[in-house]
Image (cartoon, grey):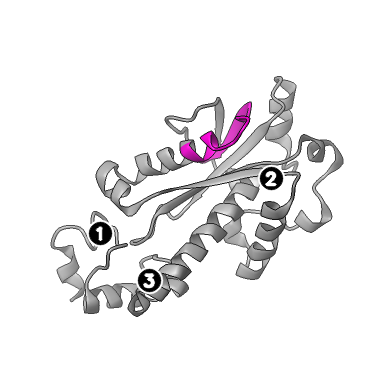
Amino acid sequence: MDRWAFERQCLAQGARRIAGVDEAGRGPLAGPVLAAVAVLPARWIHDGIPPRLASLDDSKKLTPAQRDRLFAFLTESSDLAWATAEGSVELIARINILRATHQAMAEAVRKLDPLPDHVLVDGLPVQGLPTPHTPIVRGDALSFSISAASIIAKVTRDRLMEACDRLYPEYGFAQHKGYGTARHLEAIARHGPCPIHRRNFAPLKGGQLELWR
């Protein structure tokens, strides 16, 4: 499989600065949604991915240690441009998770200077991006650019949730990162929601929390 195929198409259409965009944290019961954008050097499309990025893939397929190693290379390399943005719990409650995700993606892209010529996005079309984009279902497994964004988004959000764990240790955020595991649901039932819980998500919405008491 040519995981530069979409980037090659963009090059053929005249784009030179091509970005990948992905998010982490749309599904959890707590914490923000985190969007990331990554622009890999165009020469890598011709010369091949560097050996230290040989394992670059959808972040969900990798171990935490693998993600950390890739994250360090991606974010410390002077060859790359990247940025992140988050949709806060308050924003999610106000405009819903899909719109908050799109807003975070657009904000991350706008942080790049210069803006990319074209953006490859994991999933479906995104409203509000400041540049033309191509949505790619399962793009984090099909495009190196999106895979890079996937790693940056996942590791950034995981570290944020580990910091939240120090503030609210009774919920176990460092382990489940806010997802609705049995342990997390039990903690919500025991302690009630904390300030970073998404109160518009089931089982927190309305009276549904009572189901877990």
Q: Of marks 3 and 2, which one's residue comes earlier in the chain?
A: 2
Measured Cα–Cα span from mark 3 to mark 2: 30 Å
Query: Which amino acid does the dot numbered 1 rest on?
Result: Ala
Q: Is residue 121 a member of the stretch shown in magenta?
A: yes
- Residue 133 magenta: no
Q: Residue furthest top?
A: 14
Label 1, secondary structure: give it.
loop
Cα separation, mark 1 vs mark 3, equals 13 Å
* Residue at left offset 69%, top offset 24%: 15
Q: Which residues are magenta?
A: 107-123
Residue drawn at (52%, 34%) of the image: 110
Which one is earlier in the sequence, the residue at label 1 or at label 2? 2
The residue that disc 2 covers is: 144
Please rate how many residues cluster around mark 3, counting C-alpha atoms within 10 Å: few if below 14, some from 14 to 19, many from 20. some
Q: Estimate the x, y position of residue 22 in percent, counting from the top left.
A: 54, 45
Question: Which residue was labeled with disc 1?
Answer: 202
- Check disc 3 and give the amino acid type: Thr
| Numbered disc 3: secondary structure | loop
Q: Position of residue 169 (x, y in %)?
A: 37, 78
Q: Residue at x 61, y 28 (%)?
A: 118
Residue 91 badge = none
Q: Quadrant of residue 80?
A: top right
For the residue pair 98 and 90, the one nearer the viewer reads as 90
Q: Quadrant of the C terminus?
A: bottom left
Observer able to see residue 143: no
Q: Is residue 32 left or right of residue 211?
A: right
Can you identify the residue that label 3 sits on?
A: 181
